[in-house]
Image (tube, rainbow, N blue to C red):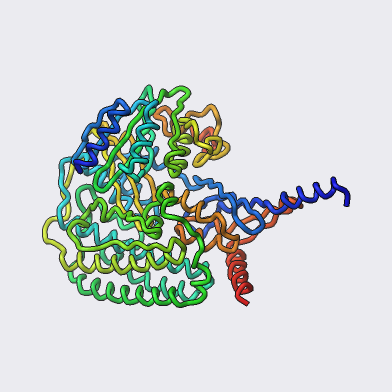
Amino acid sequence: MSEVFLQRVESCAADAKSKVTQLRTHELLTEVEQEYVKQYVSKLWNDGITRRLSTITGLDLGQKIGIVYHFWQGKDVLHVRTTVPKTNAAAVSIVDIIPGAILYEMEIHDLFGVTFGGNPWMDKKLLLPESWPDDLPPPLLKTSKPSEIRKRLKLEVEGK
Amino acid sequence: MSETKKVESAGLMKYSTENLVPFGPIHPALKEPEYFKLVLEGEKIVEVIPRIGYVHRGLEKAAESRPWVQNMYMFERTCGICSFVHSLCYGQAVEGLTMYEVPKRAKYIRLIIAELERIHSHLLWVGLMGHWAGFETLFMWVWRDREIVLDIVEAISGNRVHKSMNAFCGVRRDMPENMEDRIVEKMKYLADRARYYREVIDTEETMLERTEKVGKVSADTAEKLCAVGPMARYVGIQHDVRLNAPYAAYDEVPFSIVTRNEGDVQGLLRLRLDELLVSTDLVTYAVKHLPEGPTRVKIPPIIPAGEHSSHCEAPRGEIFYYVKSTGGRTPDRVKSRQPTMANLPTALEMLKGQTIADVPIVLTAIDPCFGCMDRMSFLDTETNKTWTWSGEKLRQYGIKYYKERRT
């Protein structure tokens, strides 16, 4: 782990009232409250601490939905994790800081049902078909069953 | 003409020059159907809106109900070109959760296969660029040479495309005996061919005309749009996971990455052909310095609880896998992000300001994984008339457009 990288990440985390955990030699994790995510990411990106965003991952954590931003710089990887409630899941968008995140947020919107406030393409679908029923839970939630999806989307021949 | 009519006419003119061109989504000859809504002003593209997901097979959901090892071969089937690197990246992410080490010989074999895959992918791409630019001879030559790599891959793994070489903490097959001389000789031949093709694209008028100053993007824009791999390197960004965060045996072999500063399709062609030379050198070095020893460590089917991520350099750029285990026989969550997804925003930026005639060459330049060339329908908003062009018609149109401009 690069000492400089660790120190800079820790100083940003302190501003966002969160702590940095070292998972492995080159892997860091920061748990950030939703309200501080934008401030934290903005500092990481604009101060040049990391200019590489691999992707954003959605997680079903039972009562909540986890959103993990994966950054890296050299050999070091930084996961920034935040959570949002499952019902009326809403998160803040980072598209105005990192425009390249637009499709990753759309993907989580499609697959986990999280709405990112500030993302201009939240009204569009990226992966799911236009015919996706509104009352069907987003497909990557643990409660969503593939058999149910197939049935509702009429992908299964009746009687089988 | 009265004042009112003039205004109406002016309004109509503005309206009629703004055309919407639905581009895609289905093309049987290419690998991924995708759909782009192109907003045109005259012939210039001003806005592009993507719509993907036509071949979304729900692999991440499927992975949650399959054993760890079965997922490795399922994720290998994500792509028909860079299949190996998917299983490698997923494998590395899972290996990070265990306490087992990958044997050194296996790391070298992984490097050899990954680089052979890069050579075959880059050759395939150069051939397609020739095809879309109307330079069929280049397409035929390059694809003939690509067979050499596929033959080597088949001799090592038994398969041309889905190698199924990876296992957790090792590889499933050892390198066949007496392959060294053959591989070294073929790599030398391929390097010579790459040098020749480099000369061709630098001097051939057809290619220069179609690729120079086409699809321009600045380094700052590419970085903000999270471009990866060749799409970042062609604007001068040092973005290569092999060098930035070495995996497999990349920290033990000497190599340097290629970057260019042109920031146009011509620069991408030069970059990928130069990368072929790096890859042939890497394979030659690794084959000559292949260490002795075991090729695999067997690990239990239950992976300890935890979360880990891994990234590798696929032929098209950084590929990313994140795995989360709760200590069971199946993963709790697997996230996979392919380079084309990361490069899509940059691709949309490249298309802006181009003409319809440039669409095939720019889309191919981004990545041949964009299917959809065969169903392009045009809509004239003034007359509400629609018509459809096949991929071949569009290709012919592009060639004719540039021929007429030349005379």
Instruction: Please say if A157 is above or below B355.
Output: above
The answer to whether any part of residue B82 appears in the image is no
Residue B104 on image: x %, y %: 15, 55
Q: Quadrant of residue B218?
A: bottom left
Instruction: Please say if B355 is above or below B204.
Output: above
Q: Quadrant of the C terminus of chain B?
A: bottom right
The answer to whether any part of residue B237 appears in the image is yes
- Residue placed most toward the observer, B152 or B235: B235
Relative side of A155 to B5, left or right: left
Q: Single out the residue that lies furthest toward the left.
A: B293
Residue B345 on image: x %, y %: 47, 48
Relative side of B253 to B353, left or right: left
Q: Quadrant of residue A1?
A: top left
Q: Residue at x 34, y 45 (%)?
A: A51
Q: Single out the residue that lies furthest toward the right.
A: B2
Residue A41 on image: x %, y %: 36, 36
Residue B81 on image: x %, y %: 38, 58
- Numbered disc total: 0
Q: Quadrant of residue A77?
A: top left
Instruction: Please say if B29 is above or below A133.
Output: below
- Residue placed most toward the observer, B253 or A53: A53
Q: Residue at x 32, y 77 (%)?
A: B192
Q: Residue at x 47, y 56 (%)?
A: B217
Q: Residue at x 41, y 23 (%)?
A: A85
